[in-house]
Image (spheres, grey):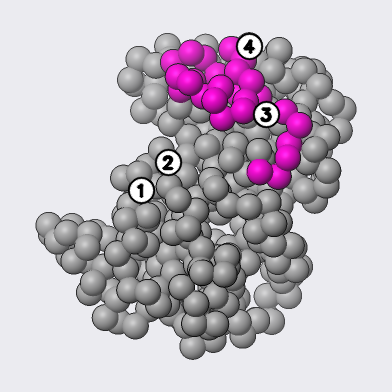
């Protein structure tokens, strides 16, 4: 997808649909702005007026409690008005086309659409055809992208290990179906990570993924060796039923992160997981709750990153560019 769809005429962020194609400077701007918001949750009584008078509409065409809530909290802390569309009772569930739905929502004078959709590129379609005064934020589309998740992960990494050029990052799990992994890979490459390793059984590794400047491993022990950052992806239950893997027990025995396996990584390695965590499937509880885990920090950073992105796209709107 061309980066130009996401940018205004002078290179500001108009939509945030994918980390792919965006510059290092722009990704760093998102991280820098998010860092300014990180302390806000501890001062929840304070709000920034950056989105006062703006309306943010959460359009979740598939379920996601955690992502929806963090977008909602982010908008509230920026003083925006929030509308959560219950897709089960909307016209879309009655056969109305996606474009018809968007046209009707545009008429309600919204400023930002936060879109989560089971079809890849649905947020891109909306961004291409929605009214020019609206910005679209991708909250996860199909197997394609989850850019705000990737950026909250980048923020968490940077808080512990600021020099991306020195980092070996190991991503383990269902790479084939992971929109999070794809967005992480694009962001890590743009930010200059030294080495990106993907670890998964062959059935969960997409063909040709090496073209994304990554190294592929089928052995968790080999992939973890001397890693600075360990990212464990959620294994969806339906993959077990689809004959891609024999059983959760066997998956954990081969690809589950245990305390013993974590010792193969560097002593100061951090452990990440985009959530929700399947304990005893992707990761041992003692690791998920252990001293090297930054999983809860990721959740906190999610609000800050979404605040940063919302404020940036609304800032580009206020300048009348597009």
Residues under labels 1 and 4: Cα distance? 32 Å
- Mark 4, mark 2: which one is toward the viewer? 2
Residue topped by disc 3? 196
Q: Secondary structure at mark 4?
A: loop
Residues under labels 1 and 3: Cα distance? 25 Å
Nearer-N-terminus badge (1/4): 1
In the image, residue 183 lies in the stretch drawn in magenta: no
Whether residue 215 can be seen here: yes
Q: Is residue 98 left or right of residue 308?
A: left
Q: Which mark is residue 144?
A: 2
- Image marks 3 and 2: residues in contact by CB distance under 8 Å: no
Q: Is residue 238 left or right of residue 293?
A: left
Residue topped by disc 1? 121
- Mark 1, mark 4: which one is toward the viewer? 1
Of 257 and 303, the residue lying toward us: 303
Residue topped by disc 4? 219
Residues under labels 4 and 3: Cα distance? 15 Å
Q: Residue at x 54, y 42 (%)?
A: 183
- Image marks 2 and 1: residues in contact by CB distance under 8 Å: yes
- Image marks 4 and 3: residues in contact by CB distance under 8 Å: no
Residues under labels 3 and 2: Cα distance? 19 Å
Magenta residues span 190-218
């Amino acid at each position: 997808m061309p980066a130009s769809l996401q940018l205004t005429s002078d290179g500001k962020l108009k939509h945030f649909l994918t980390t792919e194609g965006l510059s290092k400077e722009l990704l760093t701007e998102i991280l820098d702005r998010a860092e300014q918001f990180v302390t806000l949750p501890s001062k929840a009584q304070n709000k920034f007026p950056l989105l006062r008078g703006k309306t943010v509409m959460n359009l979740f065409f598939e379920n996601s409690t955690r992502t929806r809530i963090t977008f909602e909290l982010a908008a509230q802390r920026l003083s925006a008005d929030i509308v959560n569309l219950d897709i089960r009772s909307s016209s879309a569930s009655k056969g109305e086309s996606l474009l018809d739905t968007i046209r009707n929502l545009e008429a309600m004078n919204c400023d930002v659409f936060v879109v989560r959709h089971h079809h890849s590129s649905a947020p891109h379609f909306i961004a291409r055809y929605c009214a020019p005064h609206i910005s679209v934020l991708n909250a996860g589309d199909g197997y394609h992208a989850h850019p705000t998740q990737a950026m909250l992960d980048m923020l968490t990494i940077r808080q512990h290990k600021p020099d991306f050029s020195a980092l070996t990052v190991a991503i383990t799990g269902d790479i084939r179906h992971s929109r999070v992994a794809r967005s992480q890979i694009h962001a890590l490459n743009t930010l200059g990570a030294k080495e990106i390793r993907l670890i998964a059984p062959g059935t969960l590794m997409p063909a040709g993924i090496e073209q994304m400047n990554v190294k592929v491993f089928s052995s968790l022990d080999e992939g973890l060796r001397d890693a600075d950052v360990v990212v464990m992806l959620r294994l969806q239950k339906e993959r077990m039923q689809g004959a891609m893997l024999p059983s959760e027990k066997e998956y954990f025995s081969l690809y589950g992160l245990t305390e013993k396996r974590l010792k193969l990584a560097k002593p100061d390695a951090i452990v990440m997981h985009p959530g929700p965590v399947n304990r005893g499937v992707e990761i041992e509880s003692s690791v998920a709750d252990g001293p090297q885990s930054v999983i809860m920090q990721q959740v906190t950073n999610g609000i800050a990153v979404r605040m940063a992105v919302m404020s940036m796209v609304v800032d580009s709107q206020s300048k009348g560019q597009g």
